[in-house]
Amino acid sequence: DAGITQSPRHKVTETGTPVTLRCHQTENHRYMYWYRQDPGHGLRLIHYSYGVKDTDKGEVSDGYSVSRSKTEDFLLTLESATSSQTSVYFCAISESRRTGAYEQYFGPGTRLTVT
Amino acid sequence: KNQVEQSPQSLIILEGKNCTLQCNYTVSPFSNLRWYKQDTGRGPVSLTIMTFSENTKSNGRYTATLDADTKQSSLHITASQLSDSASYICVVSFHRSGYSTLTFGKGTMLLVSP
């Protein structure tokens, strides 16, 4: 998994509680991403980061916030979890986002269940 | 709207047989096309990346083709093995303000049976 770890790997939480997922990389890549994967959908981008303290929204960012205080760590926070946020969350990294065939590497995923 | 459609949704083949997975896209302006393999419970892993000028690319028993005129791609798996059982995801990249944004297909679930 290209030097990417995610924690926790599995989590069950109740509706309305805050949840933070962590992504840690050892590759020193500039870009980091959070995706969610749901049955019947392709992977969808939630947020991404292009440097420390530099983040931007993806296509499904409502209900999520992110932070990046160090190059190696990218946190995804659900301020008040809802059942619609039950999903598998993947972190990814890349050296570049410039137009071209840059590689994007994915972490092992976190399975989140909101009851 | 940029879309990536994959077919079939699922496929079962016998070990040792060949198979071909299809990907059609409406992404514009096109940058490149990728195929990923995702084993159950794991993150996607890149198999191939093809730019506009490439129409074939191989990675071992995996061969991807790209027809940018018809906006179609295929992934051919030769002499399948049990370890090929996985979801195969087609991903198309498009330009936006000098950056490349990825659009993911829903994947084809392949089961290789002994």
Image (tube, rainbow, N blue to C red):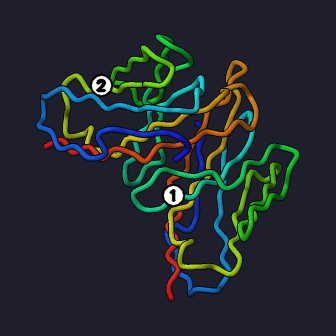
Residue B79 got which mark? none
Say what secondary structure mark 2 lies in.
Answer: strand
What residue is disc 2 on?
A77
Q: Please state the chain letter of the residue tagged with numbered disc 2 in the rendered image.
A: A
Relative image position of residue B83 (x, y in whole percent): 54, 73
Q: Residue at x 58, y 64 (%)?
A: B7
Residues at marks 2 and 1, common chain? no
Q: Which is nearer the eye, B44 or A73?
A: A73
Question: Label 1 near label 2: C-beta < 8 Å?
Answer: no
Which quarter of the rendered picture does the N terminus of chain B lie within?
Answer: top right
Q: Chain of mark 1?
A: B
Picture layout, residue A11 above or below residue A69: below
Residue A17, how many percent across, how many down? Answer: 13, 28
Vertical order, B84 against A48 (above or below) = below
Identify which residue is drawn at 45% across, 37% down.
A91
| Residue positioned 43% across, 24% down in the render | A73
Which residue type does callout 1 highlight? Gln
- Residue lying furthest right in this view? B53
Image coordinates for residue A43, horizontal then vertical, percent: 47, 44
Residue to which mark 1 is pinned: B38
